[in-house]
């Protein structure tokens, strides 16, 4: 089972921050990091999960309503006197640069189901190609249309189809969105493992306001593998690596 850090080490540290990514990058044996990108009002790719900044920062409003400079003015309380800021994707790539040579992966989720963020697909592919990171990056989105566009822009990209149920991931994928991997919710494996064979099945756990902790305290990785899951995005990857 490959273990990933979901929004960085987001159980113990503020999600999608440089601090959470630094902690993840320091974990021996971690496959990679998952994060979410959106566009600021002036077109910068910033790393933030919610469409609004309210939950994770001291600001109020939609990410797309702020310029990058304004977003950088918002504070994220990180404990121990440390304050984090919303990172740009470039800052995260800079941080992970030393890891990429060793095969470390980055799953960039385009958070564009509610707002389409015109041009985000072109921008992120261009940046990844500029830095020669095509072999390290996996793109994903809940939007099949966005992935279809991404596939047209980069025919060789690795792309994961997000949905809650794995059957819906597969359905969307077969509809021609160009994805080649399935990214379901970990409790959404509603097909027999035989039907998932041949796919990377990267399952995610959720919950940050109400952090999801597996019943019994620990995930049974062998049982999850038996269901066809190949990778897990965990908020607490440090517990499983
Ligand atoms: O990419 C996997 C997972 O992060 C999708 O859900 O809401 O945590 O972005 P969410
Ligand atoms: Ca995500």
Image: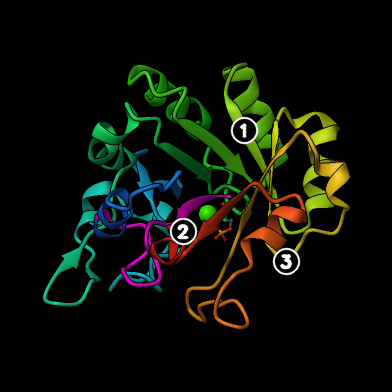
Q: Can residue 40 be spotted in the picture?
A: no
Q: Find out whether residue 17 is within the magenta segment.
A: yes
Label 3 crowd (10 A; few <14 / some 14-19 / many >=20):
few
Question: Secondary structure under badge 3?
Answer: loop
- Where is the C terminus found, in terms of image quarters? bottom left
Residue 106 place in picture, x, y as percent: 44, 39
Q: Earlier in the sequence, mark 2 or mark 3?
A: 2
Q: What is the number of the mark on residue 159?
A: 1
Q: Can residue 133 be spotted in the picture?
A: yes
Residue 94 place in picture, x, y as percent: 23, 35
CB atoms at circles 1 and 2 under 8 Å apart? no
Q: Nearer the viewer, mark 1 or mark 2?
A: 1
CB atoms at circles 1 and 3 under 8 Å apart? no
Label 1 crowd (10 A; few <14 / some 14-19 / many >=20):
many
* Count of marks, rendered view: 3
Label 3 sits on residue: 187
Q: Nearer the viewer, residue 164 or 104?
A: 104
Question: Secondary structure under badge 1?
Answer: strand
Asked if disc 2 is less than 8 Å from ligand 1, the answer is: yes
**Which contiguous range is marked in magenta?**
1-18
Residue 102 place in picture, x, y as percent: 34, 30
Q: Earlier in the sequence, mark 1 or mark 3?
A: 1
Asked if disc 3 is less than 8 Å from ligand 1, the answer is: no
Q: CA distance from mark 1 to mark 3?
A: 21 Å
Q: Nearer the viewer, residue 222 or 177?
A: 222
Name the residue rendered at 80%, 28% in the picture.
176
């Amino acid at each position: 089972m490959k273990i990933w850090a979901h929004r960085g080490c987001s159980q113990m540290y503020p999600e999608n921050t440089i601090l959470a990514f630094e902690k993840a990058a320091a974990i021996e044996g971690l496959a990679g990091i998952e994060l979410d990108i959106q566009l600021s009002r002036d077109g910068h790719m910033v790393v933030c999960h919610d469409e609004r900044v309210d939950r994770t920062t001291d600001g109020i409003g939609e990410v797309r309503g702020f310029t990058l400079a304004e977003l950088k003015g918002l504070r994220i309380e990180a404990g121990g006197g440390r304050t984090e800021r919303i990172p740009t994707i470039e800052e995260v790539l800079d941080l992970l640069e030393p890891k990429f040579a060793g095969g470390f992966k980055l799953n960039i989720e385009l958070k564009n189901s509610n707002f389409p963020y015109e041009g985000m697909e072109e921008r992120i592919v261009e940046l990844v190609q500029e830095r020669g990171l095509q072999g390290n990056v996996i793109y994903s989105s809940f939007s099949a249309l966005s992935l279809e566009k991404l596939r047209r822009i980069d025919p060789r990209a690795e792309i994961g189809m997000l949905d809650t149920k794995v059957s819906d991931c597969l359905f969307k994928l077969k509809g021609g969105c160009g994805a080649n991997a399935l990214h379901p919710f970990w409790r959404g494996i509603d097909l027999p493992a035989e039907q998932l064979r041949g796919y990377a099945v990267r399952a995610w756990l959720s919950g940050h306001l109400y952090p999801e902790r597996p019943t019994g305290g620990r995930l049974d990785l062998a049982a999850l593998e038996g269901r066809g899951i190949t990778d897990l995005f965990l908020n607490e990857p440090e517990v499983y690596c």
